Amino acid sequence: MGNGKKTANKYQYNSVDLSGIRNRNELRVINMMGQVLQSYPDFSQDVINIQDIYALALNLLPSRYTQGFSIVLKEPVTDEQISDALHKAVQRVRDNPTGPDKKYESD
């Protein structure tokens, strides 16, 4: 039913490799995550929580997809917007935990 031919590389359509197209915010969110999580010393940083925070923060930001050879002249998403998205994501994960540590003390 899909439009693409199945291959071993899931980021490939027919013979076109699409793995080099990335959301520019991905690395920016990862790089800022440690700084933001320092504000939540009692927050459980298990695998599920970190993945949830990462995904939620990216979903709160506008997508910025580029190819590996793209030239970016201006970055419309500020560090403050990324920090705000991460703080919102942490708070949402704390309020709705899905990882193994499902009980958090309220502030």
Image (spheres, helix red, strand yellow):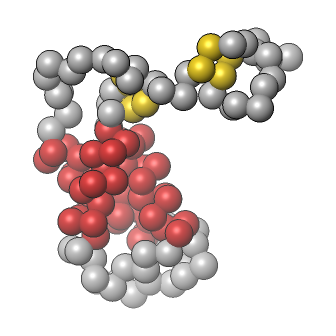
Q: Where 41 sits versus 6, above or below?
A: below
**Quarter the C terminus occupies:** bottom left
Q: Residue furthest right?
A: 1
Residue 47, position in %: x, y? 53, 69
The residue at 69%/31% (across/down) is: 10
Q: Where is residue 78 in the image (x, y as percent from the top left)?
A: 15, 38
Left of 2 or right of it: where is 16?
Answer: left
Query: The N terminus is located in which quarter?
Result: top right
Q: How many labels does the image show?
A: 0
Toward the viewer: 17 or 94? 17
Residue 88 visible in rendering: no
Quarter of the image where one finds residue 75 = top left
- On the image, the x and y values in percent for residue 57 come to 36, 49
Q: Is residue 47 above or below residue 29?
A: below
Residue at figure coordinates x 54%, y 82% from the top left: 101
Rendered image quadrant of residue 64: top left
| Nearest to the observer: residue 87 or residue 7 | 7
The residue at the point 14 percent across, 47 percent down is 80
Left or right placement of residue 17 versus residue 25 in this view? right
Q: In which image quadrant can residue 87 be found?
A: bottom left
The image position of residue 38, as x and y in percent, is 23, 74
- Write the residue at 33% across / 85% down: 42
| Whether residue 20 can be seen here | yes
